[in-house]
Image: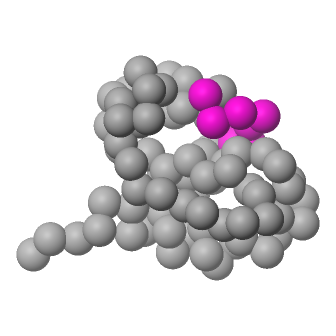
Amino acid sequence: METNLFEEERVYYDANKERLFNESWGKVVLIKGDKEYGLYDTPESAYNAGIQLFGNVPFFIQELMELDMAANYPAHLVNFV
């Protein structure tokens, strides 16, 4: 049975999106599982924090912007590593 790589994180993000937008618009949230691990000024800083916290494993970062354009791309494909 195959599951979506970020299914649990998307559920958490969707459930908390309104609060996140209201409190932290323009920031980048780092989510692993069903927990937030911080808000950052850039995707790169969120990525670096995720690497420090979890190592080289999948974790979810999402920029809190008006156009909610989440993408499920591994970081190495978007030149974060």
Q: In the displayed structure, would residue 46 be above or below residue 27? A: above
> Residue 60 at what x, y percent from top left?
49, 50
Q: In the displayed structure, would residue 26 be above or below residue 19? A: above
Classify residue 58 as left or right of residue 14. left
- Judging from the image, the colouring scheme is one colour
Q: Front-most of 9 and 65?
A: 65
> Residue 19 at what x, y percent from top left?
82, 70
Q: In the displayed structure, would residue 19 be above or below residue 65? A: below
Which residue is located at x 71 percent, y 33 percent? Answer: 42
Residue span colored magenta: 38-44
Classify residue 19 as left or right of residue 10. right
Classify residue 32 as left or right of residue 15. left
> Residue 58 at what x, y percent from top left?
36, 44
Which residue is located at x 50 percent, y 68 percent? Answer: 10
The answer to whether residue 52 is seen in the rendering is yes
Quadrant of residue 18 within the rendered picture:
bottom right
Classify residue 63 as left or right of residue 81. right
Quadrant of residue 55 within the rendered picture:
top left
Q: Front-most of 10 and 70?
A: 70
The answer to whether residue 53 is seen in the rendering is no
Which residue is located at x 61 percent, y 52 percent? Answer: 62
> Residue 66 at what x, y percent from top left?
79, 65
Q: In which quarter of the image is the N terminus?
A: bottom left
Q: Quadrant of the C terminus?
A: top left
- Number of marks present in the image shown: 0
Which residue is located at x 55 percent, y 24 percent? Answer: 48
Q: In the displayed structure, would residue 71 be above or below residue 28? A: below
The answer to if 42 sits in the magenta stretch is yes
